[in-house]
Amino acid sequence: MTERGFTVTSTEEVMVRVGVPKGSFYYHFGSKAAYGQAVINAYAEYFEAKLDRLLSDQSFTPIDRLRNFVREATDGLARHAFKRGCLVGNLGQELASMDDVFRRQLEKVLTSWQKRFALCLREAIDLSQLSEDVDVDHVAEFFWIGWEGAIMRAKLQKSATPLDQFADVFFSKVIGQPAVAKKKIGNRSKARRS
């Protein structure tokens, strides 16, 4: 589904690929829509665990934790040759205008991700990494709106360039910090992705 979408991916294709008989599939899910909702829930759990791991890593500053997420996500997309995207973003584009149940479920997932980013941004304010007047909820929402669009463009271009461009603008213009963290080595500074 991350490569081809929900509508094009048939239940038969899924059953063959995972070796599940038709009766078992429909016993557990009842319909393709129920299966799709279960897939979204499973993906949300997986992705929220990933966000929690990255955004709570106290060995990095809060802003560097956000950079780490961007780097890891960009590396993951590149590893799959930009054929896969974010399942939630893909399904949002595909199903939002067709099905209110999916639309509400996908919006709930994105809101959960935004809240995690907002908490990390609040911590950045507490550590004086960000100005106290930053509206962390607004900035977190902006990130996810832009990031999902950057993923779509990266898939179209088969390149990390849109992701890098978005990250540069987000960190330098919205957050007010360089997109790439600086690590001091002796008396010199060396740029690195962190």
Image (cartoon, helix red, strand yellow):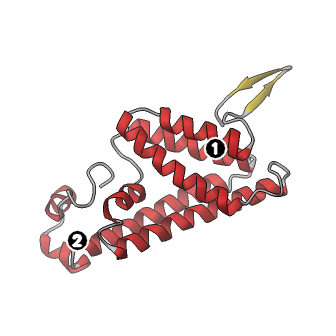
Q: State the image coordinates of residue 64 (x, y, percent, origin top left).
A: 70, 44
Closer-to-camera residue (169/6): 169
Q: Earlier in the sequence, mark 1 or mark 2?
A: 2
Closer-to-camera residue (183/7): 7
- Foreground tag (1 vs 2): 1
Q: Quadrant of the C terminus?
A: top right
Q: Amino acid at mark 1?
A: Phe
Instruction: Identify the mark at residue 119; answer none if there is no mark.
Output: none
From the image, tell me which residue sits under label 1.
170
Q: State the image coordinates of residue 115 (x, y, percent, origin top left).
A: 62, 65
Residue at screen point 22% across, 59% down: 18
**Label 2 crowding class (10 Å Cα cut-off): few <14, some 14-19, many 20+?**
some
Residue at screen point 48% across, 65% down: 45
Marks 1 and 2 sit apart, C-alpha to C-alpha, by 38 Å
Q: Vertically, is 144 above or below 95?
A: above
Q: State the image coordinates of residue 141 (x, y, percent, origin top left).
A: 59, 59
Q: State the image coordinates of residue 53 (x, y, percent, origin top left).
A: 61, 55
Closer-to-camera residue (45/40): 40
Q: Amino acid at mark 2?
A: Lys
Residue at screen point 63% across, 57% down: 140
Name the image quarter holding residue 168.
top right
Dot 1: element: helix
Instruction: Identify the mark at residue 32; answer none if there is no mark.
Output: 2
Lateral position of residue 10 relative to residue 139, left or right: left
Q: Is residue 81 visible?
A: no
Q: Quadrant of the N terminus?
A: bottom left
